[in-house]
Amino acid sequence: MTGSRVLSLGHYQPSEVLTNDDLAKIVDTDDAWISSRVGIRTRHVAAPDESVDAMAAAAAAKALAAGGLAPQDIDLVLVATCTAVDRSPNTAARVAARLGLPAPAAMDINVVCAGFTHALATADHAIRAGSAVNALVVGAEKFTDVVDWTDRSTCVLVGDGAGAAVVTAAPEPEIGPVLWGSVPEMGGAVRIEGSPARFSQEGQAVYRWATTRLPAIARQVCERSGIQPEDLAGVVLHQANLRLIEPLAERIGAVNAVIARDVVESGNTSAASVPLALSKLVERREIETGAPVLLFGFGGNLSYAGQVIRCP
């Protein structure tokens, strides 16, 4: 085996849905204001007793079932999250316990909104190196736990949920080389700090950085995989803001691709947003099996990571 591939996907969202009209009863806002600025109409909100690891395990169980693998087949669990409450046991270990995995390596990865694409690259590297054969890679967030519900600039953005992928060894690489990096001097533009922890950001600074810097980086991701942007069948960017996603996809040059717009339904779910959106596209069969898809996470820490995969 010289590479890895995404075998299957799964996702989970809490049952409670918070609409823009619901938010207007909590904070000074309305549907027109939210829709015009970020394109979000609804978001899912986890129950008080619904933990990050519970949502992660639910998504991972669906991915396992879709891939036809048993718990004992998994030897690596990576969970991307920035909203888990406890430090130990980590979220990955709790997911493994919930699923009955016998003895996997279990690690959390915190790169905020770019967490899943970092974790996917890490799983790919581990499999290529022979350190794992089958990995569970999950992005899961309970962002409504860390939002200030009196701040209309941030509370309208976020939602909860999880997305998961089973990554397995393959004769040929179906996960392309990752391109990742960060802008450390701007890391404070997105923050989850304090006690209790609260989410805040410098929205205009992040928007300028994303719209000016990221299109060229995303095109480099395609170049590393030997794919022209116009040949992409799908583009799944971090679901931060519809007004950001659409111009980014256009500037990348993905003129023939299905563009994930799950942010409209789910809001910004941080590390969960890329696998959640991808899982829905695959479930609806909007992208053909084997077709090239660009995954690109960006945001918190002013970090980014992207790769082109073959659609499962």
Image (cartoon, helix red, strand yellow):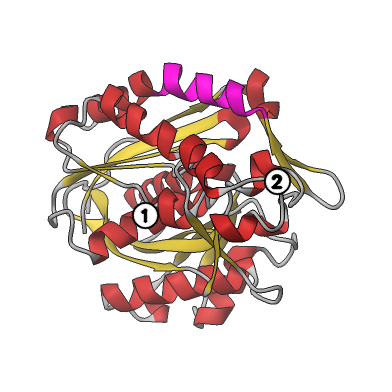
Q: Does the magenta stretch include residue 210?
A: yes
Q: In this view, does 144 lie above or below 293?
A: below
The residue singled out by tag 1 in the image is 277
Tell me which residue sits at (68%, 43%) in the image. Answer: 152
Q: Give the Cα distance between marks 2 and 1.
A: 29 Å
- Choose between 224 and 15: the one closer to the eye: 15
Q: Specify the principal SS of the magenta part.
A: helix
Residue 111 position, x and y percent, is 58, 42
Q: Does the magenta stretch include residue 288?
A: no
Among all residues in the image, which is located at the extreme right? Answer: 195
Q: Is residue 303 above or below residue 152?
A: above
Q: Is residue 91 above or below residue 47?
A: above
Task: Find residue 264 and name its label.
Answer: none
Magenta range is 202-214
Is 151 on the left-hand or right-hand side of 18?
right
- Choose between 52 and 120: the one closer to the eye: 52
Residue 301 position, x and y percent, is 62, 33
Of badges 2 and 1, nearer the viewer stands: 2
Q: Label 1 sits on what residue type?
A: Ala
Task: Find residue 28 and name its label.
Answer: 2
Q: Is residue 168 at least partly visible in the picture?
A: no
